[in-house]
Image (spheres, grey):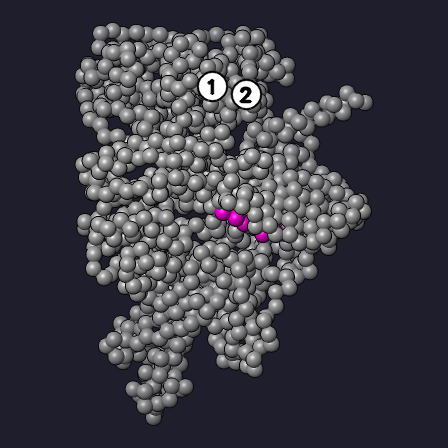
């Protein structure tokens, strides 16, 4: 990797002051934030990122904390590690999908340093993007080579002009839970629904996967408790990968169900690894309410979730895979 | 190659008192065999009854295990020398191109001491070819220097896939074109006529991808040359004695003045012979700078230019008569070894088919040459024949195990039959619900079982010179220049000496991995143990004899009256009541200050040749996600006399793991239009990890009672992936004819089957 300056601020203000506020992407790329470094370092080694300055957030006190509010909701600091999130007792009990998603990332070694903020802001894993030699659209080139190339891992939903899939496991879980993300810059703070934080390549800035503005960084995530209702909420994260030991998903599903005497009273579904953003399946959610989990419900949910899917040459299997995953997950969660 | 070559005969009658034996011969990892004439040994040593063995044929812990797991073992990559420079090489990221680099810019980078081009005019002829090298005071400066080269590539036409290489207007890889090295036997007309007569015929095209060795230590050397007349090469190599000649040539020294050190090395699997590209470059730079050079490939470079297992595409047709006796086989095989020939054993592999046609050829592409890789050519051949056998069996409504048993070759039939049946019992085949047809997808998760067999040579030859030393403190040492690829060479060397002297294993120290010690063969073809162990045994026996002779001489008695037993030295009785035995320690005190030593060479009677194996796999296929989980693997392997049962079981298990990984994950991916390798890293080039490990049952076939040592490290990898693919087919009816067995292929296969069923339904 290219040599760089290294800054270890102890306050948020100091870190934010180091971030360029220019709109010029080149200028912005000169400074990169690091927490666990599990994504940034891979980018730097492949020379996809060549920052002059790396700002380490790990010395900022309190930024790694998980706080449980009096109403049971969560506030998760940006530098909280995935291991801490996975193992947190309150998270395990009340936000199982989040703990399970965190636990499905990478390997034990990776989870022990990787951060929540870094996981949400990680760059795509598409092998065209990750090869320095390939001038893909994500790197300012004219073309998405995956579109007509080796695209078995690419998007079946929401693709174009880039066909990456969002690699985060936490994102579908947090979107399913209705989390909000807090962004700060030196001059302002924004809070927005996490779902709106992620942006499709067709929405403009194709070189970015989210709405992070100049000088902004992720500070924390607010995760509300699931709304009370008849019955109890159960949630889980289902991830299909080629290699169970350590791999990104082929397809994933964050699922929460409010089940009362076998009948679904509330549902949250968000797919991972099938689209450039975590893919909220709200139509599927709506039609599940009032039903029992049976063949028909599974089929309808699968169809609704995949409405508008347009597979590429080598990823048609993701349709069957996603349908199978939804069906498996619904049955497993409803009967647990 | 190490399969029994049918029809291979000694060149002439053996001379009186002599006999011919066939031994493996390996040059740079390429296997062949040759006949050598050896003495009919009347007083040749024997290993002794298995029942009488105290150390060997038991579970021995690795003597160097603690050093390895605590990081004390110093691998070639770990060598740091005063004044050493770090060298990095630039590998072409495109297959055919002209590379233009800015050497001056690299030289200006602080710390850089040398930058040079490696290709005349920068012309690159295959993907990954080394283009330039930069040397610097630190690894970081070397990388900065490499970046400063700012290479520009003027790309030219290339062929990186089989289809591209075979196209009419394909850019030529070789002057003669993109097809070569044809091997043909049998009569196609006869075979086609025979197939037409067969009651049952299966047809299919079976493909295996290019697999990488993926050794943990990459290829490389540290060249210790500081001017002067001597040099030492610290090399990660499978052949301590394959380096010096080439290195001496590059350094302008005599071969005898170049030492090679390989105390430990981080894996090779067949890819590490000779000085190789990094070694050659490092020697040239060391010569020019008169400074030590550290040059190891990065992981990415390792994927691009350190070799691989060739892929293969096989068009097979296999026919059987009504009773299930195989009658005819037609096999057309393309070996995909990049710019190399690739390797492919033969068809039919193992099984007996009376009428056969086999035509193999190499299809060349602009990628690096394949190399020897654990059982070269065998896993590819195994996948074809074992797959089509199962397809044929299910077509006939027959148990694929029975079809195998009915079609084993005469030579070795009893061995394979015994091993297959043992696999079947261990894996639970006889209780399995669907044995004559694949499972119907009734449950979301279906279970299946599959089988496959292997064959290998594993013999040895007169290659090694071993020394055994006895010191006055009663310690024993065994020395040989041989290298240990990780199989446990030190442990069985010490074990053999401990056995001969009836001493504890810990009293024997080992020294290996240095060209200053006795010569040894390179580790290829699983020939190391069968070449080395007999020499160790003979050296130990010679040392024991020398000990007794020395004691007898000092005592004025006859050596034949002395003996070693129960760890004590038995002396002849003297006068009345004199001591007639002494401890080994007491006896050694009588030795001269320098101790004594003896050397030994190979004895043909101690080594054998020819091993058989069978494996079975049990899998679960999740029909909703296409996921394949291997739940159990059973391997049964014969290997003559087991030296260290624990190490043998470990080899067998390691082979099954590597085959599992080949079955489910491993595959080199090169972008066909861009020519760039897309998965030259350990994230995208997937290798099985801990969560993929099934229950392993690794069984040494003790019905093989040969009192001879035979190598078996390679055959362990041959059948596993075929057994897994067969198990998947047995589970759910999806026959994946192209490895790896990834979820997309399973789901596409299931969808195809549903479509066919629906069409059939609609057609009614």
Using the image, determine if residue B87 lies above or below residue B701.
Answer: above
User: Image quadrant for the C terminus of chain B?
Assistant: top right
Dot 1 corresponds to which residue? A163
Q: Where is residue B354 in the image (x, y as percent from the top left)?
A: 73, 55
Describe residue B167's horizontal placement relative to residue A54 as left or right.
right
Nearer-the-camera pick, B540 or A97: B540
Which residues make up the magenta segment?
Answer: B340-346
Q: Which of marks 1 and 2 is nearer the N terminus?
A: 1
State the residue at coordinates (51%, 27%). A150
In which image quadrant can residue B625 be found? top right
- Provide the secondary structure element on which disc 1 rests: loop
Name the chief secondary structure element in magenta.
loop
- Residue B139 in the magenta stretch? The answer is no
Residue A312 marker:
2
Nearer-the-camera pick, B165 or A3: B165
Chain of the residue on which disc 1 is drawn: A
Nearer-the-camera pick, B53 or A139: A139
Q: Distance between the residues labelled 1 and 2?
A: 9 Å
State the residue at coordinates (52%, 80%). B42
Chain of the residue on which disc 2 is drawn: A
State the residue at coordinates (49%, 56%). B30
Residue B504 marker:
none
* Badge 1 and badge 2 in a common chain: yes
Q: Are marks 1 and 2 in contact (CB under 8 Å)?
A: yes
């Amino acid at each position: 990797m290219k040599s760089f300056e290294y800054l270890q601020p102890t306050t948020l203000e100091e870190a934010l002051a180091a971030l360029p506020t220019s709109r010029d992407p080149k200028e912005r790329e000169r400074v990169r934030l690091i927490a666990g470094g599990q994504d940034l370092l891979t980018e730097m080694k492949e020379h996809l990122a060549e920052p002059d300055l790396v700002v380490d957030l790990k010395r900022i006190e309190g930024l790694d904390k998980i706080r449980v509010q009096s109403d049971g909701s969560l506030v998760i600091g940006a530098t909280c590690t995935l291991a801490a999130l996975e193992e947190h007792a309150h998270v395990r009990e009340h936000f199982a999908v989040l703990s399970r998603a965190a636990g499905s990332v990478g390997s034990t070694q990776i989870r022990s340093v990787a951060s929540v903020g870094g996981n949400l802001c990680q760059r795509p894993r598409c092998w065209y993007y990750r090869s320095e030699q390939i001038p893909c659209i994500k790197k300012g080139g004219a073309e998405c080579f995956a579109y007509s190339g080796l695209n078995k891992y690419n998007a079946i939903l929401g693709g174009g002009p880039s066909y990456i899939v969002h690699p985060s496991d936490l994102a579908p879980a947090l979107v399913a839970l209705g989390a909000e993300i807090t962004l700060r810059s030196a001059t302002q703070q924004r809070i927005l629904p996490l779902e709106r934080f992620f942006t499709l390549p067709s929405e403009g800035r194709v070189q970015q996967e989210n709405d992070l503005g100049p000088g902004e960084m992720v500070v924390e995530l607010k995760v509300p408790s699931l709304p009370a209702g008849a019955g109890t909420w159960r949630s889980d994260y289902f991830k299909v990968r080629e290699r169970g030991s350590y791999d990104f998903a082929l397809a994933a599903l964050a699922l929460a169900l409010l089940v009362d005497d076998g009948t679904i009273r509330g549902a949250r579904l968000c797919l991972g690894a099938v689209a450039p953003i975590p893919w909220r399946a709200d139509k599927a959610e709506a039609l599940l309410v009032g039903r029992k989990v049976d063949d028909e419900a599974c089929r309808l949910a699968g169809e609704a979730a995949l409405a508008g899917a347009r597979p590429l040459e080598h990823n048609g299997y993701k349709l069957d895979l996603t349908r199978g995953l939804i069906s498996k997950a619904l049955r497993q969660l409803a009967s647990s | 190659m190490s399969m029994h070559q049918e029809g291979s005969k000694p060149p002439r009658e053996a001379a009186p008192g002599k006999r011919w034996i066939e031994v493996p011969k390996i040059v740079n990892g390429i296997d062949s065999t040759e006949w050598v004439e050896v003495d009919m040994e009347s007083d040749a040593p024997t290993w002794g009854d298995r029942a009488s063995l105290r150390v060997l044929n038991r579970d021995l812990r690795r003597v160097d295990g603690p050093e390895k797991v605590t990081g004390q073992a110093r691998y070639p990559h770990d060598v740091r020398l005063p004044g050493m420079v770090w060298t990095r090489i630039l590998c072409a990221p495109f297959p055919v191109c002209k590379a233009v680099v800015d050497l001056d810019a690299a030289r200006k980078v602080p710390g850089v001491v040398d930058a040079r081009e490696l290709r005349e005019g920068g012309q690159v002829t295959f993907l990954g070819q080394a283009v330039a090298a930069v040397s610097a005071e630190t690894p970081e400066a070397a990388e900065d220097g490499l970046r400063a080269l700012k290479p520009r590539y003027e790309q030219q036409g290339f062929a990186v896939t089989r289809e591209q290489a075979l196209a009419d207007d394909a850019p030529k890889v070789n002057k003669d074109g993109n097809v070569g090295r044809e091997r043909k036997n049998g009569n196609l007309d006869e075979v086609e006529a025979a197939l037409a007569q067969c009651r049952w015929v299966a047809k299919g095209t079976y493909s295996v991808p290019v697999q990488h060795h993926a050794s943990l230590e990459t290829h490389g050397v540290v060249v210790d040359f500081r001017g002067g007349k001597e040099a030492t090469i610290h090399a990660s190599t499978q052949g301590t004695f394959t380096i010096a000649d080439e290195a001496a040539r590059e350094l302008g020294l005599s071969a005898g003045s170049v030492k090679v050190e390989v105390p430990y090395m981080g894996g090779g699997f067949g890819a590490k012979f000779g000085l190789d590209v990094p070694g050659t470059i490092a020697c040239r730079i060391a010569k020019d700078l008169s400074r030590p050079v550290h040059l190891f490939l990065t992981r990415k470079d390792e994927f691009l230019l350190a070799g691989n297992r060739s892929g293969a595409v096989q068009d097979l047709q296999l026919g059987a008569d009504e009773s299930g006796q195989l009658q005819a086989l037609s096999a057309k095989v393309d070996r995909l070894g990049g710019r190399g020939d690739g390797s492919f054993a033969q068809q039919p592999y193992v099984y007996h088919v009376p009428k056969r046609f086999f035509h193999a050829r190499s299809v060349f592409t602009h990628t690096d040459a394949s190399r020897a890789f654990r059982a070269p050519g065998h896993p590819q051949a195994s996948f074809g024949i074992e797959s089509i056998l199962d397809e044929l069996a299910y077509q006939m409504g027959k148990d694929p195990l029975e079809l195998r048993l009915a079609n084993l070759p005469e030579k070795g039939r009893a061995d394979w039959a015994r091993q297959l049946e043992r696999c079947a019992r261990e894996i639970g085949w006889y209780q399995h619900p669907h044995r004559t047809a694949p499972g119907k997808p009734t449950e979301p998760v279906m279970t299946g079982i599959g089988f496959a067999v292997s064959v290998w040579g594993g013999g040895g030859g007169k290659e090694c010179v071993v020394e055994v030393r006895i010191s006055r403190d009663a310690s024993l040492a065994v020395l040989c220049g041989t290298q240990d690829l990780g199989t446990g060479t030190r442990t069985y060397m010490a074990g053999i000496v401990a056995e001969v002297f009836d001493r504890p294993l810990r009293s024997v120290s080992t020294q290996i991995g240095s060209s200053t010690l006795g010569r040894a063969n390179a580790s290829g073809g699983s020939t190391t143990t069968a070449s080395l162990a007999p020499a160790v045994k003979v050296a130990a026996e010679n040392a024991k004899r020398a000990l007794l002779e020395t004691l007898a001489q000092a005592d004025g008695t006859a050596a034949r009256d002395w003996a070693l037993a129960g760890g004590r030295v038995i002396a002849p009785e003297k006068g009345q009541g004199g001591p007639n035995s002494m401890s080994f320690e007491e006896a050694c005190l009588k030795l001269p200050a320098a101790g004594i030593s003896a050397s030994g060479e190979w004895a043909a009677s101690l080594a054998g040749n020819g091993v058989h194996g069978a494996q079975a796999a049990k899998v679960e296929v999740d029909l909703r996600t296409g996921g394949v989980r291997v739940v159990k693997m059973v391997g049964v392997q014969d290997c003559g006399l087991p030296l260290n049962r624990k190490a043998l079981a470990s080899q067998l298990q390691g082979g099954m793991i590597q085959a599992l990984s080949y079955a489910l994950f491993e595959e080199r991916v090169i972008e066909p239009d861009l020519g760039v390798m897309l998965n030259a890293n350990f994230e995208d080039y997937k290798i099985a990890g801990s969560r993929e490990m099934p229950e392993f049952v690794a069984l040494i076939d003790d019905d093989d009672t040969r009192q001879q040592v035979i190598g078996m490290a390679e055959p362990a990898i041959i059948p596993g992936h075929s057994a897994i693919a067969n198990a998947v087919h047995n589970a759910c009816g999806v026959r994946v004819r192209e490895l790896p067995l990834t979820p997309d292929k399973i789901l596409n296969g299931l969808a195809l089957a549903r479509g066919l069923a629906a069409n059939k339904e609609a057609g009614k």
